[in-house]
Image: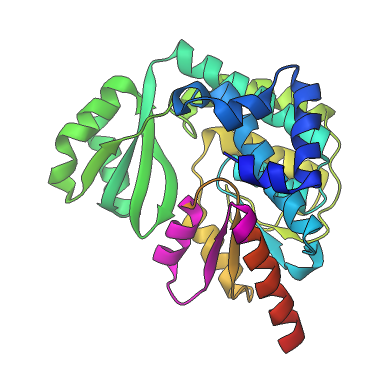
Amino acid sequence: MGRDVAEASERARAVFDRANDLLGFDLARLCFESPAEQLEKTDIQQPAIFVVSVAIWEAFIEAGGRREQFAWTGGLSLGEYTALHVAGALDFDAALRLVRRRGQLMQEASVASPSGMVSLIGADEASAQALCDRARGDGVLAPANFNCPGQVVISGSKAACNRAMECASEFECRAVALTVAGAFHSPLMEPAANGLWSVLQETRFAAPAIAVIANVDAQRHRDAAGIRESLKRQVTQPVLWQRCVERMIAEGVDQFFEMGPGRVLTGLIRKINRKIPTVSVSTKDAIAGATDRLATRSIER
């Protein structure tokens, strides 16, 4: 992932080069050449997705894009770090160190407690909570992601997830086990949150130059203390993505650009509100299209 962007953009290549230096291994080679299974470990996957996303952003800037063309930034889970970086709240080196450590801590917590995540298709907040209450037993099971209408992800102990899979139909939804290392955004990640807190306290944050929405409460990030606390809470608490998108729309956002590998958020936003144009920007051609689209919009205004 990200190879065509790096080949076409000097600024994108510089992002990968800097990441390789900071991490001490060839992340670019892993992103460009390795099979998917090598990127699926949380401690590798998180820095990889972050770096590719920033490389796409830098290629967009090189192509003539500007931060001032955006009113808000946001991201789902890991993507919140990219959003904070793009908004000027967190420099690249500090963000990558945080993301790398976050991935390591979450991987360690996953190994320590066999766990998983299950996507519930057709569920709403009430039915997802009721299913968790039914299937939890003596384990841990709780809503982890409120992604869009009809899609809630739950997270918890392996046995509890298995029970949820078995009884999902009783709650008029379909359960799909996710290929993840562990129970992200659940109480089982408490050791990871505590470990991350010490790193967050050492990290310098600035006030964002443009608005950044927080996963845990769909509120705007304001200052360093609030950002640190929100990022810690995010490790163990649900991601309110649907509410985040609805809040940005309520604040006047009338167009979204997803800058990162894949198009997951593009699909989710379209399910939240089909009237809002949403563009996936993950290739060099898509970057050119985005800069043209924004330039045309600026002229029209």
Horizontal side of 298 relative to 254 (left or right) equals right
Q: Is residue 1 left or right of residue 177?
A: right
Vertical placement of residue 239 versus 133, above or below: below
Mark yes or no: residue 138 visible.
Answer: no
In the image, residue 292 above or below residue 259: below
Residue drawn 63% across and 67% down?
Answer: 289
Can you name the residue that lies furthest to the bottom here?
Answer: 300
193 w.r.t. 133: above or below: above
Q: Position of residue 184 (x, y in %)?
A: 48, 31
Q: Residue at 55% across / 47% down in the picture?
A: 76
Residue range highlighted in magenta: 264-286
Q: Nearer the viewer, residue 146 or 258?
A: 258
Residue depicted at 73% across the width and 76% down the height: 295
Q: Position of residue 28 (x, y in %)?
A: 67, 29
Q: Quadrant of the N terminus?
A: top right
Where in the figure is residue 73, as x and y percent of width and height? Answer: 68, 58
- Of the 4 image quadrants, the one containing the C terminus is bottom right
Q: Is residue 184 above or below residue 101?
A: below
The image quarter containing residue 156 is: top left
Q: Residue furthest front?
A: 7
